[in-house]
Amino acid sequence: MNPRTAAVFDAARAQQRAALIGYLPAGFPTVDDSVEIFQTMLDSGVDLLEVGLPYSDPLMDGPAIQESVEVALERGVTTADVLSVVNRLTPAEHQAVYVMSYWNPIERFGVQNFADELAAAGGSGVITPDLTPEEADAWIEVTEAAGIDRTFLVAPSSTDARIDIVSGATTGFVYAASTMGVTGTRDTVSDAAPQLVGRVRERTGQPIGVGLGVSSADQAASIAGYADGVIVGSAFIRRVLDAESSAEATAEVGRFAAELREGVRRSTHLSEPDA
């Protein structure tokens, strides 16, 4: 595990809470604005930041993420811009910055180049939602060499055998998608999430983050009762989309991050560290 990732979950565990993980696409609404918003997220309580790499065919993403990605792509945001955004951020010692990306942009950029440049920019890991461990031999090799984490996904439909494969290939944390649908805020988080986390926890000692659907501090508190990380994306994006200026967007995101931070502090029912 990358040292910064380890520091995120060690610090959260020491404070008897879940880690707060926040997502936004880079370059939304502009590259400079996204840097300011990302830094505000870190300064307001986000422990692990997911910097989204805009992609033209985001099949797993819901309306809010698709709309924000379209804004970034229309402004010409590139993979190099995403890496530049990561490089401009200043996380604290107990914080980490990941990139969330579909596989195609990484492959087009060059697998080795991407891993090396992300590590040089200070990135700690990558989440690849559409890459399976069976197809990731080259990715596993280069991330090991670069010292960055790789995160794969499990879903409620994952068999125990599948969970073993995913957790065996994952470093950093296992991403547990709480529903079978696309991303997006929901009034309630799927009842399948606690069961999925329990199944994963029986098979790995790695931290487990739960994503897809978190839209409030109350939901964050609920997930913090059984998961090691609470992942929030669309709800952050919605605050930027609804803002009338970049300054308002930054302020709203900061306020929401602080609310979520208080939410994850409410529950202390967390897993014990590995023996």
Image (cartoon, grey):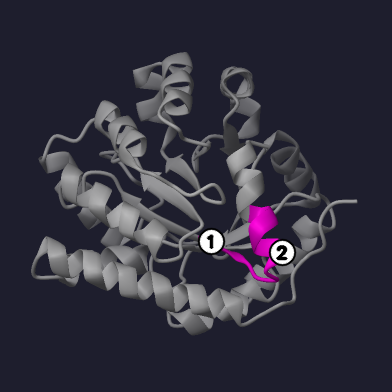
The quadrant in which residue 170 appears is top right
User: Residue 61's x, y, as percent?
Assistant: 37, 54
- Residue at 85% x, 57% y is 202
* Structural crowding at the residue carrying mark 2, measured as other residues with C-alpha within 10 Å and reported as few (<14), some (14–19) or many (≥20): few
User: Residue 117's x, y, as percent?
Assistant: 41, 22
Query: Magenta includes 17?
Result: yes
Q: Which residues are magenta?
A: 9-20
Q: Is residue 215 visible?
A: no
* Horizontal side of residue 143 vs 232, given as left or right: right
Q: Say which of 188 and 121 sits in front.
A: 121
User: Residue 230's x, y, as percent?
Assistant: 55, 65
The residue singled out by tag 2 in the image is 14
The quadrant in which residue 253 appears is bottom left
Amino acid type, callout 1? Met
Amino acid type, callout 2? Ala
Task: Indicate whether 30 appears above or below 181.
Answer: above
* Structural crowding at the residue carrying mark 1, measured as other residues with C-alpha within 10 Å and reported as few (<14), some (14–19) or many (≥20): few
* Horizontal side of residue 67 vs 4, given as left or right: left
Q: Is residue 14 visible?
A: yes
The residue singled out by tag 1 in the image is 180
Helix, strand or loop at label 2? It is: helix
For residue 6, which numbered disc appears in the image? none
Residue extending farthest to the front is: 93
Which of pointers 1 and 2 indicates the residue nearer the eye? 2
Helix, strand or loop at label 1? It is: loop
* Horizontal side of residue 245 vs 237, given as left or right: left
- Residue at 43% x, 40% y is 99
